[in-house]
Image (spheres, rainbow, N blue to C red):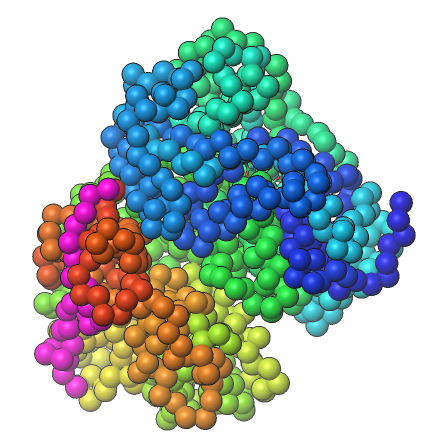
Amino acid sequence: MKALPSRAQVVIIGGGIVGVSVAYHLAELGWTDVVVLEQGQLSCGTTWHAAGLVGQLRSTESMTRLIQYSADLYARLEAETGFGTGWKQCGSVSVARTPERMTQLRRTAAQARGYGVTAEIITAAEARELWPVMRVDDVVGGVWLPGDGKANPSDLTQALARGAQRRGVQVVERVRVTGVTVEDRVVRSVRTSEGEIEAEYVVNCAGQWARQIGRMAGVTVPLHSAEHFYVVTEPIEGVRPDLPVLRDPDGYAYFKEEVGGLVVGGFEPDAKPWGMDGIPHPFEFQLLEEDWDQFSIIMENAIQRVPALETTGVRTFYNGPESFTPDNMFLLGEAPEVRGFFVAAGFNSAGIASAGGAGRALAEWIVNGAPTADLWPADPRRFARWADNDTWLRDRVTETLGLHYAMSWPNRELETARPLRRSPVHHLLAAAGACFGSKMGWERVNYFGEAAPYSFGRPEWQPRVNAEVGACRTEAALFDQTSFAKFTLKGPDAAAALRWLCTAEVDVEVGRVVYTGLLNDRGGYESDLTVTRVAHDEYLIVTGSAQATRDFDVISKGLGEHRAVLVDVTSAYAVFSVMGPKSQEILQSVSKADFLAFPFGTSRLVDLGHATVRATRVTYVGELGWELYVPAEFAVTVYETLLATGLTQAGYYAIEAMRIEKGYRAWGRELGPEVTPAAAGLRFTCRKTGGYRGEERAMDDPGRHVVSIVLDDPEAHLWGGESLLHDGEPVGYVTSAAYSPTLGTTVALGFVHDATLEKAQVDVAGEMYSAQISRKAPYDPTSSRVKA
Ligand SMILES: Cc1cc2nc3c(=O)[nH]c(=O)nc-3n(C[C@H](O)[C@H](O)[C@H](O)COP(=O)(O)OP(=O)(O)OC[C@H]3O[C@@H](n4cnc5c(N)ncnc54)[C@H](O)[C@@H]3O)c2cc1C
C-alpha cells in the first residue's frame, strides 16, 4: 500500500464512480494534487452492482445536459484511457399503458427536443419492432431515445480512475476515513485509519455512507438507504446484444440485455428502507438477502410485458442498497455549514448516468469557486438541519424510490413523513378546508377545497383558485405565508454589508422596505428578496421558503469583515398577508394605526386587535396590500382577529396565478444564478451608485430574456417546462404558468432567445398553441387601484 501524503489540495472520500469522476475532472482542469481514499476497493460500495442504464431525460434542462455530457464522456473514455467501459449507445424505448402516461411521454419528448435531445414518439407496433420480445396489445404508445445507452459501472470506474491517475491523482484503497477536522467553519484535514491528511478541500463522495461522513464534519447530508433489486435471467430467444433498454414505468419495470438474457429491475411504489442502525462494516462487494415478496410487483408486471419470462429461469437475484434523498434529486455542492467541504452523494439509483456530468460540475465548482451552471435542483442548500433526522428520512425514502416511475404529474406533492413543519394557525387553515402542499418541510395552503385528482389538463381545483383570485382582485384575501424565510442582520456595519450584497439602495431611512437582487460575481441572481430597515443598525430580510439555507449561506459568506450578525428568525414569526383593493379599509377596521397614510415600500409596528405586529406594505400579487409579521405566540390571536373581519382565505395557487398575471419573477423559475437583471427585465432594481457585487456583469445580455406569454386558445393549459417554437425551431421555454381567471386564458412566464419576438407556438405534448409574447405584464391592476 502507498504511504499517505501528509497534505493534499483535495481529498476525495469514496472510490465509487462519483468519487473517481470528481477526481478525473479535477485533473482535467489541471488540479492534480488530489487524493482519493477508498475504505475497500474501487467500486466496492454500490457502484459494482448497478445495472448500468444511462437515460438522458430529466425534468430540468441543466440536469438533462449533465447526463448528456455523461453519455458523451462514456462514449470516448475507452479510446482515451485504454480501459473498456462496456459503453453501448443502444437507445431506449419507454412504453405507456395508459393515455395519461402517453401524455406524460409526449410532454417529456417535447421538452427533450427543446433541450436538443432526440426523442421520437412511436406507436405500439413501432415499439415492438425496436423490442421484438415484448407484448404490446396493452400498450398505448411509446417514446424512442436513440442517444441513451448502457455501460459497465465497475469498468467505467476503473477507466475514470486510470484517467485521473495518469494526470497525477493518487487513488489509495484500504484507507478508511474516521474523522474530519473543522476549524472556524473551515475544513482543515481528514483523519484516517492510516493517519491524517491536511486538505484545502474535502469532497464527500461516500455514497450511502455520506450522511455518516457529513456528521463527522457537522454537515447535513440528508439521504437514507433503501433496498433496490434486479434479476438476471437465463438467455431468451430473440434477446440480442443491440437490444435497446426498455422501460415500462406503469409496470414499475426496466429491461436490459445481458449475455443473451435480460436484466429485469424496477422501482416499486412502496420501497423498503435499509440500514436504520447504520451501515455494517465492512460492507464490500456485498449484497442483501433476496426478497421475492418485495420484488413480486416488479416481476409480475415484467412477465406481463415479456411473456417469455414466465418460462425463463433466473440466474441471479441482486439486492443492493442504494441511497435516496427526500426529493429524489442528488446532493451536489459545497456544504453551507463548512467551507471547503463539498458533497456529491445520494444518487437515487441514477449515479451511473449522473456521475460524468456531476463529477465535471463539482470539479468546476471547486476550481472556479462557484458553479458554472445552474445546479440549484441538486444543491444541498435546498435542505436544512431538520432534514437530517433518521426517522423522517427512513419514512420519506419509502416514497422517493418509487418516484422514478411514478407519474410526473404537474404539482405532484410527496405524501410521506408529513406534516412536518406547521404554521401556528395550521389547525385553523385545516378547519377551513385547506388542501395543503409542502415546501422546505412546511405545510402550506395550495387552495381551500377538497384534494382533486392530478391532471395534465385544466385541474378540478381551478374553480376554487379562480374564486380566491377573484376575491383578492375585487375585495381582499388573507394568505398565510408563515413559511417565508426571515433573517435579521444586526450590527454597526449591517448597512455597509448589505449595500455591497444588494443591487438596490438599502441605506434607506428606518421603516423603508426595498425589493432587491443579490447577485453573484457573474451578475446572475443568487436571490431576490425584500430588505426592511427596522433600526439604524438592523434589517429584517425576507426571502422564499425554499431559499432559507441558500440565502443565509450567500449573505453570511458575503458579510466578509463587516461587523454584523445574521440570525435566522424564521420560526419566530408568522406572516399573514392581506391583499386586495379593500385591504386598507379591512385592516383599518381592526387597528388604530393610520393605514391611509401608509406609503408603498414602508413598514412599521401597528396594533392589530389586542396584538402588536409589523405591517409592511408590499405586494407579490399586484394589489394594494400588507404583509403582517406576527410573533409566533400572537399568531392565532391575530389570525382570528383577521378572520372575524370576514376576509376570504386563499392559498399559494392563487398567489402563483396573480404573480404571473402581474409578470413578477420567481427565483428558481425565472431568476437564477445564470440570469442577470438585464435578462430578467429588472434593471430598475439596479440603480444604486457606489458598487455592489456582480455590478460589472449585471447588464450582460446572456442571450435569453424573461418574457410574459399569453395563450390565444383559452382551453389550452400550461404547467411550465413546455418548449416555445417559432417557424418550427426551438426559441425558448416556459418557466411558470397558470390559468388567469382575470384574463380568461393561460398566462405564463418564460425565456426566449430573441427579445424582439412577439409571437410563438407552445408545444404542449406535441400539440401547438399560438401565444403572444411580451416584455410587459399582461395585467397591471396597480395603477388603477392603489390608494396611498
Ligand atoms: C440494484 C441497483 C441498480 C442500479 N442501477 C443503476 C442504473 O442502471 N443506472 C444508474 O445510473 N444507476 C444505477 N444504480 C445506482 C448507482 O449504483 C449508484 O447511484 C452509484 O453507484 C453511486 O455511486 P457513488 O460513487 O455515489 O457510491 P458508491 O459506489 O457506494 O461509492 C462510495 C464509496 O465510498 C466508500 N466509503 C464510504 N465510507 C468511507 C470511509 N469512511 N472511508 C473511505 N471510503 C469510504 C465506500 O466504500 C464506497 O466504495 C443502481 C443501484 C442499485 C443498488
Q: Position of residue 108 (x, y in %)?
A: 34, 42
Q: Position of residue 303 (x, y in %)?
A: 43, 14
Q: Nearer the viewer, residue 214 or 717?
A: 717
Residue 125 colored in magenta in the image = no
Which quarter of the picture shows residue 685? bottom left
Above or below residue 609? Residue 77 is: above
Q: Is residue 662 visible?
A: no
Residue at (61, 26) in percent of width and height: 319
Residue at (50, 17) in percent of width and height: 239
Q: Position of residue 720 (x, y in %)?
A: 29, 53
Residue furthest to the front in view is: 79
Above or below residue 278? Residue 660 is: below
Which quarter of the picture shows residue 280? top right
Q: Is residue 548 left or right of residue 723?
A: right
Region in magenta: 766-788
Residue at (57, 30) in percent of width and height: 51
Q: Nearer the viewer, residue 103 or 569?
A: 103
Q: Position of residue 630 (x, y in %)?
A: 35, 72
Q: Is residue 435 visible?
A: yes
Q: Nearer the viewer, residue 54 or 381?
A: 54
Q: Is residue 637 left or right of residue 506?
A: left
Q: How many marks?
A: 0
Which quarter of the picture shows residue 771? bottom left
Q: Nearer the viewer, residue 169 or 294?
A: 169
